Image: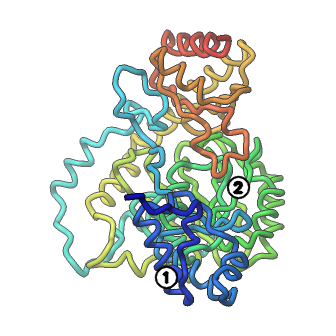
Amino acid sequence: MPQPSVPSDPLALITAQTAAEIAEAVRDLVDTGKLAPGASLPPVRTLAERLEVNRNTVVAAYGLLVQAGVAVTRGRAGTKIIDLQPLPQEGFSNITGKIDIASGNPDPDLLPPASKALAQLAADEPVLYGQPVIDPDLANWAREALAADVSDAELTVTAGSADAVQRLLADSLTIGDAVGFEQPCFLTTIQTAQAAGYRPVAMPVDAEGLTVEGLRAALDEGIRALVVTPRAQNPTGAVISEARATSLRNLLADYPHVLVIEDDHFWQLSGHPYRSIIPEGHPRWALVRSVSKSLGPDLRVGIVGSDTLTSSRLGTHIRSGAMWVSHLLQRLTYLLTTNPETPAQLEYAAAEYAQANARLVAALAARNISAISDDGVNVWINLGTIASPIVEALGHRGWLVRDGAEFSLDHTDDAVDHIRVTIHQLSPVQLEQFVSDLVATLAE
């Protein structure tokens, strides 16, 4: 018996008339595999004419699909069926037999030892429901740390900086809202945008940080929030200059409704001053600082200073009896960061990161390979060619590196020509071998 033919355009099967029916029909096509992940939906006008319905009916249908997590809206790029392919993750790889310089991790040997602080924790009384969500000692330390850079900040404690950024956006945005992200962009931030259904708008980064042109274009796109890294931008290591920060503040002053989130993750180790792009008196802002790079990623503690409204929204879900950060982690963070030996240890760690990265940058420059690392734990290497085959070839030589394309929001920038490496755990011999292998690979 002959099989019924499947139309080349699965959407031609739809005969629905209401927004709910159209959305349900599209979901059926997705669930049955007739409409593949990443497939583009027709322009609103086209589908409305085909179904002989009002244009607003299709707009509403697409809105329902976005709310259900079935589709994502990309502005001028249209609406597409969401493709939830696993995204690259920060951290050590489970690949064996290679030297992993792709992780982006701090050096375990440069983290302050936690043994004394852990012993002190054993004597503490347990914290029960109903007690303050922020440890009082940590709150005093955090407020003092924030007060040096921002005034009139309300304090919130989150489970690290990524948790803070995710919650800040979720408390202010809805699915489909436009959000400005740096280009290239931190991996976790890309995952946040994809999972929440925001419309990411790429804002290019250069040697002085976020560009004025990039921010202006994003504002013209209608962004309602933006996430920026004032120093140690990941993956480039860029630091916002004072002149650039001033220009960005002046531009943002005309957009008081935009939530400005600064992810200052390297604050305890940076050799550069904090230069904020938040305009004076801006009504919606948040400064996020974690201890992941300085004290250890597993502490999962971030401090957030923000305006009163933003803090109120953020704190609604982080309350006693709900989603507060463990007081054991808060106490451990406080004990570690206030240990009299810690400042010297952090100063030593900061110098080690900077020197190791500078050695690699200089060694590559001697072989005519451009690389930058103004701040942070990574080095951003410009290969001058598409990185993916180089990444694969380096893998055959025993090196695991991070393809720059993984940090690109839309692959329209030159991140695809870069690799990111984290080399502070390499010995001098290993560092020299990596440079030699990279040169040889590029020459093949």
- Quadrant that contains the N terminus: bottom left
Mark in front: 1 vs 2: 1
Q: Amino acid at mark 2?
A: Arg
Q: Which mark is residue 275?
A: 2
- How many marks are shown on the rendered structure? 2
- Residue at 80% from the left image edge and 63% from the top image edge: 217
Crowd around label 1: few <14 · some 14–19 · many ≥20 (10 Å): some
Q: Which residue is mark 1?
A: 312
Q: Which mark is residue 150?
A: none
Q: Name the outermost residue toward the front.
A: 1
Please indicate whether residue 223 sits to the left or right of residue 82 in the image. right
What SS does tag 1 mark? Answer: helix
- Residue at 65% from the left image edge and 89% from the top image edge: 53
In the image, residue 405 above or below residue 261: above
Residue 263: quarter of image: bottom right
In the image, residue 422 above or below residue 65: above
Q: Nearer the viewer, residue 212 or 303?
A: 212
- Residue at 63% from the left image edge and 62% from the top image edge: 200
Q: Amino acid at mark 1?
A: Ser
In primary-sequence order, the first of circles 1 and 2 is: 2
- Quadrant that contains the C terminus: top right
Where does residue 178 sit, x and y in percent of width and height? 66, 70
Q: Nearer the viewer, residue 243 or 43?
A: 43
Measured in 3D between alpha carbons, the distance from the residue under mark 1 to the one under mark 2, in whole angstroms, is 25 Å
Where does residue 176 sit, x and y in percent of width and height? 60, 73
Where does residue 251 sit, x and y in percent of width and height? 82, 67
Q: Is residue 3 visible?
A: yes
Crowd around label 2: few <14 · some 14–19 · many ≥20 (10 Å): some
Residue 391: quarter of image: top right
